[in-house]
Amino acid sequence: MANIHFPFLSLLLIQCFIIAFSTTATDQSALLQFKAQIEDPRNALGNEWTSTWMSVCNWTGVSCGHHHRRITALDLSNMGIKGTIGPQLGNLSFLVSLNLSGNNFHGELPRELASLRRLKLVDLSNNALSGEIPAWFGNLTALQQLYLGGNRFQGEIPWEIGKLAALEKFGVQNMSLVGQLPSSIFNISSLKEIRVYNNSISGTIPSDMCDHLHHLQVFEISTNKFFGHIPSNIGECKNLQTLSLSLNQLNGFIPSSIGNLTNLEVLYLDGNSLHGKLHSALTFFF
């Protein structure tokens, strides 16, 4: 009986090896094509990024899963890399974390990245990326952290961002964004950080913001064009540690409920048309 099953098991093992090798080769090919479109003046990627004999899992900035040996994380942050983000990265189908921040990538984001449905972290901040923020980010429903700030993105924040039900940290600061902050974003109950400062975003702060954002710790919207009143129930965002509303067009009274924010460490209200008093224990500017 054992002799009958042995050839079958051997064939199965060989097939598994071939599948594993071919899928790993797909990841390696994607990175080699990506490398061909960029400049690496510091040689930060090292010689292994030109090698086909070394396992891709041992390349600088690459992490792989323990079992399937597919690329799960790509961290090339702060390496001085120049060039465009090629569509080949869309073939890294097991990618969970993509960090290309602090480089000199330029151009628009390739739509092929929309196929990376396992992504939980995307950090493309502090580059020179341009165009509009793609609506297809809304399809990456596993995303927990999305950092796009410090680029040259223009236009409006797509409403599709509000589809990211697992999103915890969202940063699009220091750019030239216009329009309103999509109301759908204020319904993402998992959000802990919203950073949209230094843009030209307008609109009002929803009066029911704290009804949904129970975990919000950072709300930074300074240096924009927000108008209207600060929600009277802002004190119900109990976990707020940073509240930065300065240099907008807000008016009316400073809500007394701000005094209920016992975890608050940073408060900026200056550069608006606000009046009233705050809890004496708070340090503030307005």
Image (cartoon, rainbow, N blue to C red):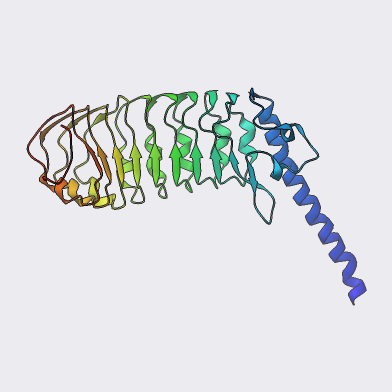
Most extreme residue toward the bottom, as rendered? Answer: 1
Q: Nearer the viewer, residue 98 or 16?
A: 98
Question: Residue 101 at x, y = what percent?
Answer: 51, 33
Q: Is residue 1 left or right of residue 120?
A: right
Q: How many marks overall?
A: 0
Q: Is residue 146 left or right of residue 118?
A: left
Q: Is residue 260 left or right of residue 79?
A: left
Q: Quadrant of the N terminus?
A: bottom right
Most extreme residue toward the left, as rendered? Answer: 276
Quadrant of res 56: top right
Question: Residue 122 at x, y = what percent?
Answer: 50, 39
Q: Residue drawn 56% across and 46% down?
A: 96
Question: Residue 95 at x, y = what percent?
Answer: 59, 45
Q: Nearer the viewer, residue 188 or 42?
A: 42
Q: Nearer the viewer, residue 4 or 225?
A: 225
Quadrant of res 148: top left
Q: Quadrant of the C terminus?
A: top left
Q: Residue drawn 27% across and 51% down?
A: 239
Question: Residue 117 at x, y = what percent?
Answer: 54, 45
